[in-house]
Image (cartoon, rainbow, N blue to C red):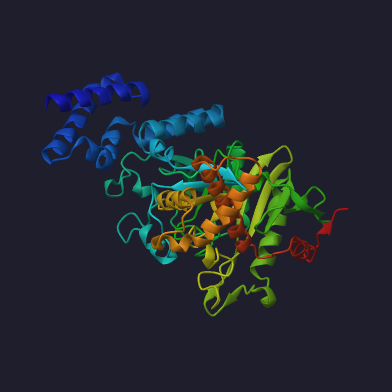
Amino acid sequence: MRDNLKTAQELTDYAIANLELDPADVNYIRNRVLEILVRATEEGYTEETLNASLEDEVYAELSLRPSQVNAKFQALLAEDSKKATDWLYGYCVANRYVKKAVLDRNPRFEANGLIITINKAKPEFKDPKKAKQANSVDGGFCKCVICRENEGFGQRDKRNLRSVDLTLGGQKWFWQYSPYGYFHEHGIAVNCEHRPMYVDKGTFYRLMDFVDLFPHYFIGCNAPLQRIGGSVLAHDHYQGGGEILPMHKAGAAYTLSHPAFPDAIVEVVAWAGTVCRVISPSRETVAELSDIIRKAWVSYTNPKIGIIPVDEEGVHSAISPTVVKTSRGYEMSIILRSNITSPEFPDGVFHAHPEFHVIKKESIGLIEAQGLFILPGRLEEQLSLVEDAIVAGQRLDESLQDFQRIYDETLVFCSRAAMAGRPMTKETIHSCMQEELGSVCGRILDNTAVFKDKQQTVQFLTKLGCVLCR
């Protein structure tokens, strides 16, 4: 009991210092936390299992109520939007909803112009149907895992979740940070109405509303289809945050104009995927021109290159729009996607091809399409064993035969490193493995490109009235 009391006091002291706990509430909160700790002790929890299973319950008691968090955020937002997001993100880290300590242990590096992370915190979902099932809630007052009704829901470890109000396109939305974010200040904007993911002209306006509020963030919308969209397609939401991803930094392979929109340019982005970027200081221009591209793509048919927008199995073509606000105005990148399958590619013609599934078989959604690859946690150990085999000059063990291509291609990078005078240490070989992963992920993006030649993208745009700039 004495140890529990000491812990409860330390936690309330922490809450005063970090979670804005009112000293007038200390006795009440300390006793609430003490009750949780005593119950955990009686049920046989250790310090380790307490952290894993009851942390959100303890920190929910220590945190401000949702209404208080929202009120503080709105007051800061009226002063300065970055001050508001800095405070909210810091608060969600401090109240342990954002698992920053876990995230910081995920390997992360840059290679081939991409950002690669190995996600040790979440399971791998190779089957999009299973991924969808794992991210849904059947019945009850929470229609799915991202509904706002989850706030405080203990069965999904949401007791310490805190969200804030947004208005996008005149609709009620809310913003929350992801507990296992893939990039800096990764969050989701969620429609308060539970309705399926969709993209229409209003989507472009809502995305621009968001960056008007938070010009230091990007925001994007997953394509509303399996294999090329997110894992939660049943509820309309966007993803964004405080890190500009590689695709947004990519230059233009070609620049076009449109006579009906003299205040805009359209870029064919120099990127492995197929991306058209609409740029203008005018919201109306960006929305109008982006929607022309959207409508043209979702009805585009070209069987010679495998593009069939709809068949007996359903709709196959969609876009993933994503926007940043820069000195040039709104930069709306429109990623053209197709989820069609074939006998040769049953997991998707424009998905990671089978030779790369040992590295990435999960859906290639909005974040990967922008150049940040989230690879499964199993790879940390598996690739380390491949590196060990290279260090020892041995062939791969039978259990690692699926990695033969990775092994062979890493040896090529090692040969180049040796020719450059680099000693073949484990550190050098690890660096060569990172180069190989960057190469593989680049080729996966090539797989997702619906137009394999940038000239095809130019031709697609010129049929919409765009004119190539000389």
Q: Is residue 430 left or right of residue 419?
A: left
Along the viewing direction, whichever of 315 and 263 lies nearer the viewer? 315
- View extreme (right): residue: 470
Q: Locate the N terminus by quadrant.
A: top left
Q: Is residue 126 visible?
A: yes
Asked if 6 appears above or below 191 in the picture, the reply is: above
Residue that appears at 16% across and 38% down: 40
Coordinates of residue 15 in the picture (x, y in percent): 32, 25
Coordinates of residue 265 in the picture (x, y in percent): 78, 50
Q: Is residue 387 left or right of residue 328?
A: left
Residue that appears at 80% across and 47% down: 263
- View extreme (bottom): residue: 312
Q: Is residue 217 left or right of residue 153?
A: right
Along the viewing direction, whichever of 441 and 170 lies nearer the viewer? 441
Residue that appears at 42% across and 44% down: 180
- View extreme (top): residue: 23
Along the viewing direction, whichever of 408 and 262 lies nearer the viewer? 408
Q: Is residue 169 visible?
A: no
Coordinates of residue 9 in the picture (x, y in percent): 22, 22
Image mark count: 0
- View extreme (front): residue: 393
Q: Quadrant of residue 201?
A: bottom right
Residue that appears at 66% across and 41% down: 325
Q: Is residue 104 left or right of residue 249?
A: left
Coordinates of residue 184 in the picture (x, y in percent): 51, 38
